[in-house]
Amino acid sequence: MAQPTPHSRGRRDTSAGTNGRTLDAAGRLCDGASAMKIATWNVNSIRARQQRLMDWVASAQPDVLCLQELKCTDSEFPSLELRTAAYDAACYGQRSYNGVAIASKLPLGNVLRGLDDEADDQARVIAATAGPVRIISAYAPNGQAVDSAAFEYKLLWYERLRRYLDAHCDRNQLLVLCGDFNVAPEPLDVHDPALWEGQTMFTLKERSALKRVTDFGLVDTFRRHHAEEGRFSWWDYRMLAFPKNRGLRIDHLYATVPLAEKCTAADIDREARKGSQPSDHAPVWAQFDL
């Protein structure tokens, strides 16, 4: 598969493979499948975590997988390995930092890289269509420290993301916006809300910025199925945060209402955070009956 041009903001790519699965005129899978499992995972360097990624794909078998924090160029992305595993892939890479991708068992079409609004050298958003569903993989800025320039960039980035949705998307279409948002939306998404209140990833400004995005008409698919506390998607590498479950839920899979109504299950794969040299994030997935 031809590699996309690095940093081609707003460039659309309608090429696609078949991967043995086709659609009829109504956008239905012709092989009789009706469920679509969509997952998102910040892999924190795909070169360091490639084997873990391929092992997880083989066991979890998502129909669509959104990836963030690739830390690689487009040419370094394992497109061939994913194609061997029957996944079409589109990548928007960046050396050493950022980078997002979408892999799909269905052919990917109408690929759009970047927020398409202004010059920006950070590869953080890629969108594509897989079957009847529009998929957006996003990697929000971390923000570093409150009141820093990076924090202000983060808040502006969220406003740009909302403008992107308004310009390119329809709240009535089947659409998923997923990825690492670097924001815990509610106190139950934080292991110690009192400790984290006012710190990066759990400030009122960040939560308001994320809500501004979800007010577009997006549903948190995980919370649609899980109301309990203590469920997180990210744990610091330090201070035994993972075994002590001192984490935050900052990776989200949002769906428009028409698609969220078809969501039959959602979860966080905590097991994928275990083992040697893991990402500090766990995959998050949701399944839809289409």
Image (spheres, helix red, strand yellow):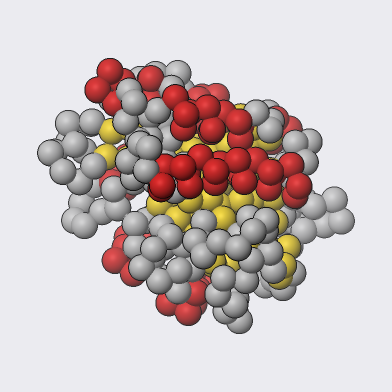
Res. 202 image quadrant:
top left
- 236 on left or right of 174: left
Res. 172 image quadrant:
top right
- In this view, the residue farthest toward the right is 25
140 w.r.t. 93: above or below: above
11 w.r.t. 199: above or below: below
Q: Residue at x 80, y 52 (%)?
A: 27
57 w.r.t. 80: above or below: above
- 142 on left or right of 22: left
Q: Residue at x 43, y 77 (%)?
A: 76
Q: Position of residue 246 (x, y in %)?
A: 23, 31
Q: Is residue 159 visible?
A: yes
88 w.r.t. 211: above or below: below
Q: Position of residue 194 (x, y in %)?
A: 28, 18
Q: Is residue 263 visible?
A: no
- In this view, the residue farthest toward the left is 239
The N terminus lies in quadrant: bottom right
Q: Position of residue 240 (x, y in %)?
A: 13, 38
The C terminus lies in quadrant: top right
Q: Residue at x 54, y 46 (%)?
A: 157
